[in-house]
Image (cartoon, rainbow, N blue to C red):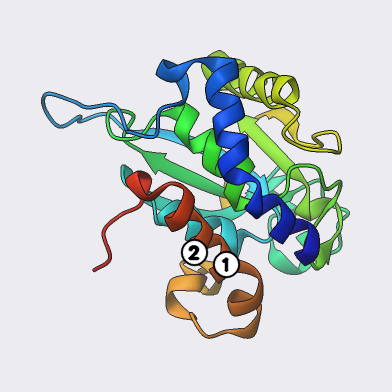
Amino acid sequence: MMSTQRTRRGLVALITAQLFIVAGAGAWGAQAPAAATPSRTTQKLVLAGGCFWGMEGVFESLKGVSNVVSGYAGGRKVTAHYEMVSTGLTGHAESVEITYDPSAISLDQLMRVFFLVAHDPTELNRQGPDSGTQYRSVIFYADATQKRAAETFIHRLAQARVFKDPIATQLTPLEAFYPAEGYHQHFMARNPNYPYIVYNDKPKIAQLRKQFPDLVKDRS
């Protein structure tokens, strides 16, 4: 995965240019939409793309994102526990629930980060060193707007031939999201030197800052 991931990261600049041409400047600009007054309305998006530690860390780094919760989606409440989900038999995927302000960051921009930085959408039932259906790539859409945005984005990726392999990301209606155990929450922020984080997830943060600097929160 790592050699493939490095190659893919080296192509992100070209990818962005291709997508810009396919979709048009208005749809793919890096700048977040401006708002005359602060929005009082937030929205939520549930995504899955491998271990939720890295997904959480990436999306927590974005302007306009006020909260990210690691958890489980795709299965039943009774099986929404780490030990059970880890068997790969529950239907759950390790997921993140992203709370964001659409006046500060758009759904389209969240999709860009998801597909081009946060994970490899061409991997089927695995991500990097982790394998199993619980690590699959999924957009759990909450409504028709989210579904349409995801379908459109995947179509644009295919038109631009961004990836050599087919996109394996599933589009699944969100039935419920169940927060994971407390020790999983904000894991990257609390354990920056944990070997798994250093090897698999910190490079994603570096890539995010390099490719989409206008979307990243200022360092505190």
Q: Which residue is mark 2?
A: 206
* Residue 195 versus residue 168 in the image, above or below: below
Q: Considering the numbered disc 2 on the image, is that residue within a helix, a strand or a loop?
A: helix
Q: Residues within 10 Å of mark 2 (few under 14, many from 20)?
A: few
Q: Residues within 10 Å of mark 1 (few under 14, many from 20)?
A: some
Tell me: 11 left or right of 193. Answer: right
Which residue is disc 1 drawn over? 203
Residue at the image point whose x is 88% and y is 54% from the top: 89
Q: Which residue occupies the foreground of this view, 132 or 155?
A: 155
Residue plotted at (49% across, 56% down): 58
The amino acid type found where label 1 is placed reads Pro
Query: In the image, residue 8 lies at what x, y percent?
Result: 70, 50
Give the residue displayed 22% in from the left and 27% down from the top: 34
Give yes or no for contact between labels 1 and 2 (Cβ–Cβ under 8 Å): yes
Tell me if 220 is positioned left or right of 186 in this view: left
Q: Which quadrant of the figure contains the C terminus? A: bottom left
Position of 42 relative to 159 (above/below) = below
Q: Position of residue 124 (x, y in %)?
A: 86, 46
The residues tagged by marks 1 and 2 sit, at their Cα atoms, a distance apart of 5 Å
Q: Position of residue 72 (x, y in %)?
A: 65, 51
Q: Which amino acid type is shown beneath numbered disc 2? A: Ala
* Residue 204 horizontal/vertical position (percent): 56, 61
Answer whether residue 86 is visible to the viewer in this image: no
Q: Nearer the viewer, residue 79 or 160?
A: 160
